[in-house]
Amino acid sequence: MKVQLEALRKSAAEKIAAAKSRADLEALRIAYLGKKGELTAILKQMGKLSAEERPVMGQLANEARAFIEEAITASDNELKEKEKAARLKAETLDVTMPGKQIELGHKHPLSIVLDEVKDIFIGMGFSIASGPEIELDYYNFEALNIPEGHPARDTQDTFYITDKVLLRTQTSPVQIRYMEHNKPPIRIISPGRVYRSDAADATHSPLFHQIEGLVVDKGVTMGDLKACLETLAKALFGESTKIRLRPHHFPFTEPSCEVDVSCFRCGGKGCPMCKGEGWIEILGAGMVHPQVLRNGGIDPEEYSGFAFGVGLERIALFRFHIDDIRLFYENDMRFLSQF
Ligand code: DAH
């Protein structure tokens, strides 16, 4: 038995030293010390021993068990350390490596200009209103003094959903919608998409954007309109910009005007940009027609107001010296990344 125990210690020591993983060690522990293990098998022979030999062998067997257990624990600790070192090595993070570049998008040129215009008007105490793009004929035309058969409808042909429902051709219907639900003083701008059944070319698109303006209060005059639009023009095109109001006709304003700005390229002398005129037309405006106020539920005897409508694309074309409106919609990164 003594010889058996010695051989057991020796073979266990060799195998433990050769173990490559913690799983190997566990298998060895079971093989040597488990219930059906080799040590148990040896101990089963204890019954054959004499009373004197038994405690001596018992002592030796316990020593062999302790020896194997210790060897396994030591080897296990060693393997644990090795595994940890390998894991740390695999997970090493080089903080000096260049980071991954995250590509941030940026604003579309139309959004850049729209945000500027919003800032300018918010600075003058305006709020932002909105209205539906699918609009009733009533708001888009009727309530703005453009009854069926009116020639102004010809210039604003659009996409009809039914006889009475259409894609709005202008942001002006927001004037009526806003007046129906809000009492003066009113000071709003309303930017948004508008539609016309025009073929796309350098200056036309079936979808484009307008910004409507509406001010209604007691004693509002054309002087207020001029000051307001002059502030807009100077903020957009520079402090030295002048504006000019030319008589015009819109069905929903009386009197009406078109507003020109002094050419921001030549300063008014005349150049190819302004086609030698010195002036560039940027928007339509006027004093809100008394019937339009009435249609919005406001008494024209008590209140007056002015309105204007400006094409966002037109402003952006001038602002960035672009000569083709289609560039705004084509999503060509070579164009968009320049802003
Ligand atoms: N809605 C007009 C258009 O699309 C632009 C316009 C002109 C709006 C004069 C106004 C205005 O509010 O007073 O041509």
Image (cartoon, grey):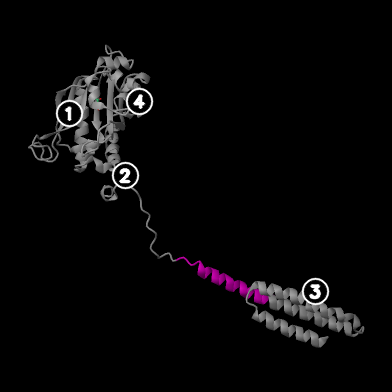
The relative height of residue 254 versus residue 116 in the rendered view (above or below) is: above
Work out whether mark 2 precedes mark 1 in sequence or the reverse, and give the earlier one: 2
83 vs 115, left or right, is right
Residue linked to disc 4:
135
Q: In which image quadrant can residue 193 be found?
A: top left
Q: Residues within 10 Å of mark 3 (few under 14, many from 20)?
A: few
The answer to the question of whether label 4 and label 1 lie on touching residues, with beta carbons closer than 8 A, is: no
Q: Amino acid at mark 1?
A: Val
Identified at 30% across, 43% down, the residue is: 108
194 vs 248, left or right, is right
Work out whether mark 3 precedes mark 4 in sequence or the reverse, and give the earlier one: 3
The numbered mark at residue 107 is 2
Work out whether mark 3 precedes mark 1 in sequence or the reverse, and give the earlier one: 3
Which quarter is ligand 1 in? top left
Q: In which image quadrant can residue 291 be found?
A: top left
Q: Magenta span covers which residues? A: 73-93
272 vs 210, left or right, is left
Identified at 65% across, 74% down, the residue is: 76
Residue 185 percent across, percent down from the top left: 31, 20
> What's the CA distance linking mark 3 and mark 4?
88 Å
Q: Amino acid at mark 2?
A: Lys
Residue linked to disc 1:
259
**Viewer-proximal residue among 246 and 64:** 246
> Furthest-top residue in view?
301
Q: Residues within 10 Å of mark 4 (few under 14, many from 20)?
A: many
The relative height of residue 246 versus residue 240 in the rendered view (above or below) is: above
Which numbered mark, 3 or 4, is in the foreground of this view?
4
62 vs 15, left or right, is right
Q: Amino acid at mark 3?
A: Lys
Q: Secondary structure at mark 1?
A: strand
Number of numbered markers = 4
